[in-house]
């Protein structure tokens, strides 16, 4: 960004002059034309920079009036920006933009104003927080139509994130030593060919005074021999085909000694499927960061072997010396990001974030036929946790939206209002590649409660409606409760309805219950009520249902009521000495009555299973009996009063002493 004497600049480019001022080119700038020079450069702010920090202030102001083919426009803009930074460690910025515009075109007058304020703070690769507020308003007149509109949008975002993903290298700053070793970092090995002298040791790091660096001393290097510092086989970072990774490390050492980064990508058999390398870097006494980015990993790749290679310079003229290594990093990204440690070493938390958004709107419009006033508010809160691969593993949301509107058209006024509330919690398995697969199909586990309410009122009608939904889902298992309530009243009728539904399903099997309750009354004297329950199941692709309903209707023609049951078996139960007894049931198209008392009956056809008799029947003494074999017996009203018997062969009459007095038919029986 500082001005370079030997460079040319195009209109619009910005530089920092030697006086610390930020300048913007107003036209193409030739070589050797440094700012300040008002013929080429515009002073737009101030900047203070050091080797480790930067502070910037930018301010521009612009006014413009144009007239094109009868359209007149007046416009003004002001932008103010302030930025501070500490070399890749922390950043902070404030930006404010204010603009206004007035336009007149063919009878249309428009006035528009905006104000945007943005606050951003960041620890690169660790945490970010931002707040944005946008204000805008517009007033438009076209003929007799006038519209006024205003809007406020506020967004707050805070996140702790792993830019480019987690550092996949174990013990990347070499702080932890192998158990029982005073020189070898845990999880790392040294690959040294014969004939090369070497030694290693942990030392205090001048890059991170609170930490250590790994020092490697070498001698006897040749153009084909070198020392590699690489993760142990069990610590090789796991990767997948198609990913792009970036390897980096901070190094310093003997001036002129060579250093190079390599990556060997391997399949499940351990075979190298592809490699990546960069040119030989020349070491110096100061720290420098060496970076290598791979091409997309080939099919079958499951891990990679990073190699931090100490070697001679290109001409192999410097073959001995030392190198210090610190803050090695491998990340799934096409761009190197700020330093971060490895979660497996530090038990650091995975990425997380939180956002809050509130939007307020208001609008009033007047036309030749009507007037409309509307306003709304939307609030959204979101929190999330993501794994090292950037895949969200858990998320919660809360959304509230409120709208209000009043409209008058041709003397008819209508007012409406609506409220929407939603709570949602989601999670998915965090198991490496499994999380990626699940990210493609969505959230595996979710729970949600959604409530939507609407009201409407006009000169002729009023209505209110509310819908509440409760959902829970784990993979293919889901449960739902839905409640719909509505009321409508007009100058002709009034009605109310409630529908409740409960359902549960596992894979393709589903069970559901729906209950409906409604009432209606109108000015013509009609009244009706309904209550019904419907049950339905689906098992193996086959549907089954059962239901019942109770209804009552009153109208000028009379009163009618119905109770309807749909079931394979309908049964009444009561308790007899503590035991359930069914006095009445219907099953398979047949009616079963255990015991009945009929005061007055009319039977078109009667079938007797065994016999028909009086309640005082005593064989040969009193009462009467007719059995299904065709035998009929009549006794006197009291014992000893005589009797009559009849079969298909004979009729017999007995006196009070049981002496047969008359026999008709077959006299032999």
Image (cartoon, grey):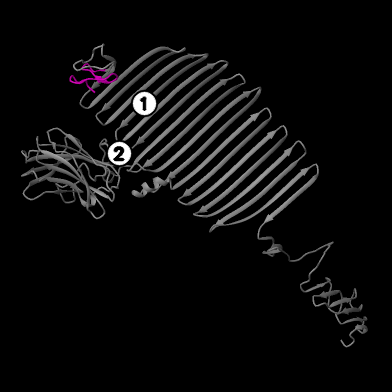
Give the crowd class for mark 2: few <14, some 14-19, many >=20 residues within 10 Å: many
Where is residue 540? Give x, y as percent: 53, 59
Front residue of 296 and 226: 296
Is 223 left or right of 87, judged from the image as shown? left
Q: Residue at x 69, y 46 (%)?
A: 530
Q: Which residues are magenta?
A: 1-22
Task: Provide the residue designation for mark 1.
Answer: 119
- Which quadrant of the rendered structure holds the C terminus? bottom right
The residue at the far bottom in this view is 668
What secondary structure is the magenta-colored segment mainly?
loop
> Which is more foreground, mark 2 or mark 1?
2
Residue 396 badge: none
Q: Secondary structure at mark 1?
A: strand
Residue 164 badge: 2
In the figure, 95 relative to 471: above or below? above
The residue at the far front in this view is 69
Mark 2 or mark 1: name the one nearer the start of the chain: 1
3 falls in the magenta region:
yes
Where is residue 385? Give x, y as percent: 38, 41
Is 457 left or right of 505, judged from the image as shown? right
Q: Residue at x 54, y 43 (%)?
A: 469
- Which quadrant of the rendered structure holds the N terminus? top left
């Amino acid at each position: 960004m500082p001005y370079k004497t030997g460079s040319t600049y195009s209109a619009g480019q910005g530089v920092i002059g030697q006086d610390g001022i930020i300048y913007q080119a107003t036209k193409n700038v030739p070589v050797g034309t440094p700012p300040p020079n008002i013929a080429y450069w515009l002073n737009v702010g101030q900047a203070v920079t050091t080797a480790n920090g930067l502070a910037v202030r930018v301010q521009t102001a612009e006014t413009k009036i144009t007239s094109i083919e009868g359209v007149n426009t007046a416009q003004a803009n002001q932008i103010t920006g302030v930025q501070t930074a500490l070399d890749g460690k922390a950043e902070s910025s404030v930006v404010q933009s204010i603009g206004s515009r007035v336009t007149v075109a063919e009878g249309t007058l428009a006035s528009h104003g905006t104000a945007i304020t943005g606050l951003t703070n960041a620890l690169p690769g660790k945490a970010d927080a931002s707040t944005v507020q946008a204000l805008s308003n517009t007033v438009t007149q076209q003929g007799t139509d006038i519209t006024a509109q205003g809007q406020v949008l506020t967004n707050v975002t805070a996140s702790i994130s792993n830019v480019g993903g987690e550092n996949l290298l174990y013990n990347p700053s070499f702080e932890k030593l192998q158990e029982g070793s005073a020189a070898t970092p845990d999880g790392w090995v040294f690959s040294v060919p014969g004939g090369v002298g070497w030694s290693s040791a942990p030392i205090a790091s001048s890059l991170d005074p609170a930490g250590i660096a790994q020092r490697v001393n070498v001698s006897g290097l040749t153009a084909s021999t070198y020392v590699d510092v690489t993760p142990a086989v069990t610590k090789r970072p796991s990767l997948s085909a198609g990913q792009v990774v970036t390897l980096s490390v901070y190094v310093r050492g003997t001036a002129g000694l060579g250093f190079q980064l390599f990556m060997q990508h391997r399949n499940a058999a351990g075979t190298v499927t592809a490699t990546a390398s960069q040119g030989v870097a020349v070491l110096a006494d100061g720290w420098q960061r060496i970076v290598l980015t791979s091409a997309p990993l080939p099919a079958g790749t499951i891990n990679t072997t990073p190699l931090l290679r100490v070697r001679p310079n290109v001409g192999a003229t410097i073959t001995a010396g030392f190198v210090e290594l610190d803050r090695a990093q491998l990340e799934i990204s096409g761009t190197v990001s700020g330093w971060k440690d490895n979660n497996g070493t530090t038990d650091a938390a995975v990425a997380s974030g939180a956002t809050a958004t509130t939007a307020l709107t208001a609008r009033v419009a007047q036309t030749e036929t009507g007037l409309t006033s509307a306003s709304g508010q939307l609030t959204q809160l979101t929190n999330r946790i993501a794994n090292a691969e950037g895949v969200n593993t858990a998320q919660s949301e809360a959304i509230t939206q409120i709208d209000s509107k009043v409209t008058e058209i041709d003397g008819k006024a209508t007012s409406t209002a609506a409220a929407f509330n939603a709570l949602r919690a989601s999670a998915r398995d965090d198991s490496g590649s499994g999380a990626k697969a699940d990210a493609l199909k969505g959230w595996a586990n979710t729970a949600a409660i959604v409530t939507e309410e609407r009201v409407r009122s006009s000169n002729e009608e009023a209505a209110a409606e509310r819908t509440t939904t409760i959902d829970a889902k784990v993979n293919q298992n889901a449960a739902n409760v839905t409640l719909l309530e509505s009321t409508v009243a007009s100058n002709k009728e009034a009605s109310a309805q409630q529908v409740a539904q409960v359902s549960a399903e596992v894979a393709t099997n589903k069970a559901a219950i729906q209950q409906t309750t409604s009432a209606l009354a109108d000015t013509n004297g009609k009244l009706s009520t309904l209550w019904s329950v419907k049950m339905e199941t689906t098992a193996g692709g086959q549907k089954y249902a059962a239901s019942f309903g109770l209804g009552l209707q009153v109208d000028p023609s009379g009163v009618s009521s119905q109770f309807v049951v749909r079931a394979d078996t309908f049964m009444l139960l009561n308790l007899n000495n503590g035991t359930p007894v069914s006095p009445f049931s219907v099953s398979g198209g047949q009616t079963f009555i255990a015991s009945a008392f009929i005061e007055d009956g009319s039977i078109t056809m009667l079938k007797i299973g065994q016999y028909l008799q009086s309640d005082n029947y005593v064989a040969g003494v009193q009462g009467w009996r007719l059995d299904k074999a065709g035998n009929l017996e009549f006794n006197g009203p009291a014992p000893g009063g005589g009797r009559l018997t009849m079969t298909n062969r004979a009729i017999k009459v007995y006196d009070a002493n049981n002496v047969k007095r008359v026999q008709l038919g077959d006299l032999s029986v």
